[in-house]
Amino acid sequence: MASRFSGALQLTDLDDFITPSQECIKPIKIDKPRGKTGAKIKIGEDGYFDISDGREQKLQKVEITLADCLACSGCITSAESVLVTKQSQEELLRVFSERKYTDNMGVTKDISLVVISLSPQPVLSVAVRYKLTPEEATKKLAGYLKSLGADLVLDMTVAEDLSLLEVQQEFVQRYQEQQNNPAAKHLPMLASSCPGWVCYAEKTHGSFILPYISTTKSPQQIMGSLVKQHLSKLKEVTPAEIYHVTFMPCYDKKLEASREDFYSDILNCHDVDCVITAIELEQMLETNGIPLSDMPNIDLDWPWSSEGSPMVRRHTGSGSGGYADHVFLYAAEQLFGQSDVPLVYKNLRNPDFREVTLVKDGKEVLKFAIANGFRNIQNLVQKLKRGKSLYHYVEVMACPSGCLNGGAQIRPVSGESSRELVQQLEQLYAELPQAIPTENKLANKLYADWLDGKDSDKAHAVLHTGYHAVEKTDIALNIKW
Ligand code: SF4
């Protein structure tokens, strides 16, 4: 089975039989010749040879065992995979028919309202798969989901905008704090919206890396708070009576939704109850034998007490939400009084690792990067550990090419390469109507009416989160990148 997780969370089966993947790395120990630093390896036709001391010595073939995998903690654990199976398409169909769900504590609850929130990347995946425009795909999806039993189908633009507004504010505060206290670990600020990256960081780099990760919640989790805490009041139902489903590009989002941080004892529920991906939606349609084109066209819902129009939108910058671009432009203006600065990225090792700088008075005052994919993340973390990172902000995304290429997006058709498919998705993303966070009337009204204003304690409590280093126990192999 191909993994639908990001590369950082490779999982090849759900019952703990984990096949070593190309991403698995096991360090081997080579005794260095006295007085020499470093080891030299030669790759021969029949194996690897240590040639550090001028003599060829064949190295033992490395095997990665299940014990190594469990100790590594780079992949998801079986406990986490159970949480993932609780968010399957079968579970969703059962919930639709019974209007009941069982939470992670094993408590069964009645449902008054099924709310489905659509993120743009899987909508585009569906559009490409079924040869529809993004607008047609959105309406057909709303028609299909409502035919199954959804009460409200929403776009997530407001949550994406709130996330960007918070991130850019957080960055400026951190930048200023770093100037006042250069010894503090405020920078580089590392993006937090990719759970593949966050999960990897918590398990593999723990307390070293966590202070650098932005505390702003991802759009999925902000949407979760909005639906459970605010929409529930508008609809006069309890938060636990809402079954909230998000439509996402990867399985990693299921892990994010299951985090204890996003369960409220007071509300007695998670913010997001189920995550369904593009590839699962394709399977649901195929299982039912229903062509998406036969579904009625239904507009997205707009349940909010504010002006606005429901629509799946793009943000300037990357197809992962445009974090680096938004933070860069905001910081250039707020910190250096420079508006509309050009954003010209320079590719580094590959197009998935690129950087952009703002130079003032001959000095690089802002240095940002986008690092997509596991290999680039490893390089970034290594640089950080050696104190060699010069970045102020890095948009870190676990998937190569970012969220448009998420692990659970619909696969290319035969004869089409993954690269060609991603290019199509990037093209469609660029054609979506553009969202401008500062001009989002609903976001501004939510700050005023629901969150007690920007930078308030409530805004911080609702829109931010924390991370936890995962302790490794019974470590057979403690991999340090
Ligand atoms: Fe999911 Fe996007 Fe992260 Fe990939 S890059 S794991 S699609 S959030």
Image (spheres, rainbow, N blue to C red):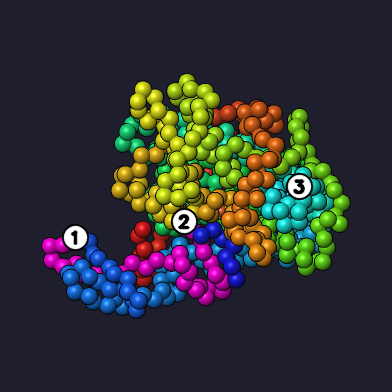
Label 1 residue SS: loop
For this rendering, which residue is in front, 200 or 105? 200
**Residue marked by disc 3:** 133
Label 2 beta carbon less than 8 Å to ligand 1: no
Residue located farthest toward the left when viewing the structure as drawn: 35
Please tell me how many numbered marks the rendered image carries. Answer: 3
Reply yes or no: does residue 373 show up in magenta: no
The residue mark sitting in front, 3 or 1, is 3
Q: Residues within 10 Å of mark 1 (few under 14, many from 20)?
A: few
Identify the image quadrant of residue 13. Answer: bottom right
Number of the label disc, if any, that sits on residue 37: 1
- Whether residue 430 is visible here, answered yes or no, is yes
Q: Quadrant of the N terminus?
A: bottom right
Residue 263 at x, y percent in the picture: 60, 51
Judged left or right of residue 124, residue 465 is left
Q: What residue sits 31% from the left and 78% below the top?
A: 60
Label 3 residue SS: loop
- Which range is magenta? 8-36
Identify the image quadrant of residue 37. Answer: bottom left
- Whether residue 273 is visible here, answered yes or no, is no
Q: What residue sits 68% from the left and 63% below the top?
A: 413
Q: Amino acid at mark 3?
A: Thr
Identify the image quadrant of residue 447. Answer: top right
Residue 90 at x, y percent in the picture: 73, 66
Give how far apart the Cα atoms at labels 3 and 1 are.
Answer: 58 Å
Residue 481 at x, y percent in the picture: 36, 58
**Residue marked by disc 2:** 374
Instruction: Tell me which numbered mark, 3 or 1, is placed earlier along the sequence.
Output: 1
Q: Amino acid at mark 1?
A: Thr
Give how far apart the Cα atoms at labels 2 and 1 are.
Answer: 28 Å
Q: Residues within 10 Å of mark 3 (few under 14, many from 20)?
A: some
Contact between marks 2 and 1 (CB within 8 A): the answer is no
